[in-house]
Amino acid sequence: MTHEKTRKPQKSLIVHVCLAALIAVIAIGCGKITTASEDLIGVWKSSDIQYSDTSFEIQKNAITFRNKEGNRNSYGIIEIKKKMMEDRNWVLYTIYYMNRDMQKVEFPFYFQMSNSGLIRFKNQPSLVWKKDSGITT
């Protein structure tokens, strides 16, 4: 009985990942931007003590969040929107992905190419995230 309980979350995860991949393939066929640019690809970390054990990784077709407990949640990217800000120093990116409940989630952030790249979340503009050189989550 406990064996079945441990298998159900794995099956559920596989189903969700397959559905997210299918949605991403359909989105590609519709002409939407679904792959992250090379500037964004990598592991991003903050020096803020509150987020010292967390990170997020942007891959070409997926985004992965790592929490303080070390748990990772990966999602297939279904769309990316990009808007240059008026100051021409920052770009507003919004990454869209499907969560485990199959709800479309948006992840908006500002990106600045200078200083080897900086990210500031739209809802936390004072918090700075920098690309971690060579380390993956």
Image: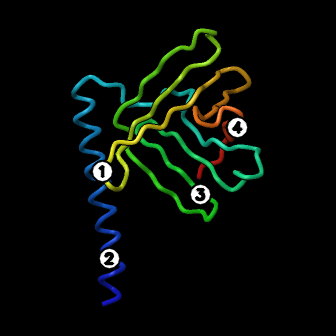
Inspect the image, locate mark 3, and give the three-letter code of the amino acid beneath it: Asn
At horizontal 22% and vertical 28% (from top left) the residue drawn is 29
Q: Name the residue under label 2.
A: 7
- Seen in the picture, residue 43 relative to 15 is either above or below; the reply is above
Q: Which element is circle 1 on?
A: loop
Q: Mark 4 points at which residue?
A: 127
At horizontal 71% and vertical 43% (from top left) the residue drawn is 46
Task: Verify CB contact (< 8 Å) between mark 4 and mark 1.
Answer: no
Which disc is residue 136 wearing? none
- Seen in the picture, residue 123 relative to 31 is either above or below; the reply is below
The answer to which quarter of the image holds residue 77 is top left
Residue 62 percent coordinates (x, y)? 43, 42
In the drawing, does residue 24 fall left or right of residue 105?
left
Task: Verify CB contact (< 8 Å) between mark 3 and mark 4.
Answer: no
Inspect the image, locate mark 1, and give the three-letter code of the amino acid beneath it: Met
Dot in front, 2 or 4: 4
Mark 1 / mark 2, whichever is N-terminal: 2
Q: Residues within 10 Å of mark 2 (few under 14, many from 20)?
A: few
Q: Mark 1 points at which residue?
A: 102
Q: How far apart are marks 3 and 4 (CA)?
A: 16 Å
- Seen in the picture, residue 21 relative to 115 is either above or below; the reply is below
In the drawing, does residue 37 fall left or right of residue 67?
left
Q: Name the residue under label 3.
A: 67
Inspect the image, locate mark 4, and give the three-letter code of the amino acid beneath it: Leu
Residue 41 percent coordinates (x, y)? 54, 34
In the drawing, does residue 41 fall left or right of residue 100?
right
Task: Verify CB contact (< 8 Å) between mark 1 and mark 2.
Answer: no
